[in-house]
Amino acid sequence: MEPGTQIRCEMTKWGERPHWQFAGIYLGADRHGDWVGFPQGTHNQRPGYEFHSEVDCVTLVPAHGWYAATFHAPGIWCDLYIDVATPGRWDGTVLRAVDLDLDVIRMSPEPPTFVGSAPQNRAAGPGEVFVDDEDEFAEHQVAFGYPADIVGSAQASCDELVRAVRAGLAPYDGTHQRWLAELSRLTAS
């Protein structure tokens, strides 16, 4: 896929239950995976909720990882929001994955401003890394019938992501800045 290609993200919950849908721009790939950009104002919708993004963001879709990591430009309550999910798969220009509830979040270094959907753990301080929606993950294992291997892969991914983000390992070391700049370049005209 060529940089600048318009793409669509379609996330579901287990069992093909509808979840987030939004459009974006394919930015390119590096050793970490594919990078997709979402300019400020991108319309995000899921059943029962929708919003327009307040800042530019870029999402890393690793080739084989069980997550999608979204890095936000400054100006909102978090600078990193990682959805633990099945590995993303491309169907032409549509990116699909199944959201598995767990989220690894790094709060912005500045005091947070909560607009829209903020995490359950609102007491998290600036720069803090934590896991959100563990209760939802436990509930959905029963309600949606997650297979044991899916539960194990999601939990292992979550645990590894927390370690990597806290340690500041690549790509959680500022690697995303290049891709935010590319998004700005592609949307400047």
Image (tube, grey):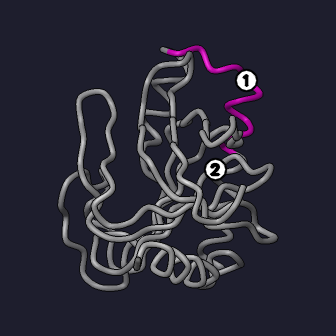
Specify the amino acid type for callout 1: Ala
Residue under label 1, please give it. 148
19 lies left or right of 34: left
Q: CA distance from mark 2 to mark 1?
A: 18 Å
- The image quadrant that residue 176 belongs to is bottom right
- The image quadrant that residue 46 belongs to is top left
Relative image position of residue 166 (x, y in whole percent): 59, 75
Q: Which residues are magenta?
A: 144-155
Magenta stretch: residue 145 in it? yes
Query: At 53% across and 57% down in the image, what residue appears?
Result: 82
Q: Is residue 162 above or below residue 107?
A: above
Label the magenta part by its dominant secondary structure.
helix
Q: Is residue 144 above or below residue 125?
A: above
Relative image position of residue 129 (x, y in whole percent): 48, 69
Along the line of sight, the residue nearer the viewer: 73 or 154: 73
Relative image position of residue 150 (x, y in whole percent): 71, 30
Query: At 50% across and 27% down in the image, what residue appears?
Result: 13
* Quadrant in which the C terminus is drawn: bottom left
